[in-house]
Amino acid sequence: MLINVNNIQCRNIDQYKASNRATPFWIAKYIFNYESESFDKKVLDFIEAEGLRLAQAVNDNAANASTRIRSNERKQSNAIAGVLAEYCWKHFINANSLELLVKETSFEQAASQIDLETLKNNKTIEVRSSFPRNGIEFAICSPNYQFDILGPYKNNYKPNEIQKDFYLRALFHVPTPISFLTMFKRDGFPVYLTGGATWDMMADDNVAIEKNLIPEDDINDTEIQSAYRVIPFSRALDCKDILTLIKESENS
């Protein structure tokens, strides 16, 4: 497993000179070599098993007003990607701290988001992932189609009630969500930790917006067009900034 941290300067890229992201955006890139590294194989085999278990636990009667039934492959790719995103974010936070800061939360129900929690002050951290087929620079820099940090579902949003303390995002550059199932077992497979946001940012109407979307890592059995509180990458914290805030929250 290799880890690189570098920045994307959107307006220095020819096709993104009109990007809404004016400042450099630091990302952490995790590279797994399933075929040639025994440690990576063990990690990814474990993550795959956990993801398959999570996908099998989906309650088929959980959703209503369904518009399209998701295939088992789609559920599996979303669940495995979610567990892998959680693993990488947990590793990144703990590896860049003097002591362990975060752990996984206990499994309660399959429809719940993949979460982390700080060890000292029990700060809650939601991890979400997506599969941008046009690449990471597109997801961060596109002036018209930039991706977002996902927050609470609109029906659950209460401005004065903290839903999660932090929201984190991971991206997988694959042609389709289904292709993820084979690609993550190839040498050189990258996972991009792109940044995050705080609850205060999600509650601020000058920062967050409401957006209709289908979260890529939603493992429910139906695809429902839903309104979420989100923060576009142009307004989001990068991986360095969100790491700093998580560390500071443990010292407050």
Image (tube, helix red, strand yellow):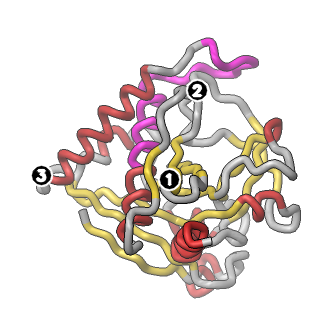
Q: Amino acid at mark 1?
A: Arg
Q: Secondary structure at mark 3?
A: helix
Quarter of the C terminus within the rendering: bottom right
Q: Is residue 176 visible?
A: no
Q: Is residue 82 magenta?
A: yes
Quarter of the N terminus within the rendering: bottom left
Residue positioned 31% across, 37% down in the render: 48
Position of 184 with respect to 62 (left or right) is: left
Choose between 97 and 122: the one closer to the eye.
Answer: 122
What is the CA distance from the residue labelled 1 to the residue labelled 2?
Answer: 22 Å
Q: Secondary structure at mark 2?
A: loop
Q: Which residue is mark 2?
A: 220
**Percent of width and height locating residue 141:** 62, 71
Range covered by the magenta-colored residues:
61-84
Q: Secondary structure at mark 1?
A: loop
Q: Which label's residue is closer to the chain start, 2 or 3? A: 3
Choose between 198 and 161: the one closer to the eye.
Answer: 161
What is the CA distance from the residue labelled 2 to the residue labelled 3?
Answer: 33 Å
**Percent of width and height locating residue 187:** 21, 56
Q: Which residue is mark 3?
A: 38
Choose between 229 and 179: the one closer to the eye.
Answer: 229
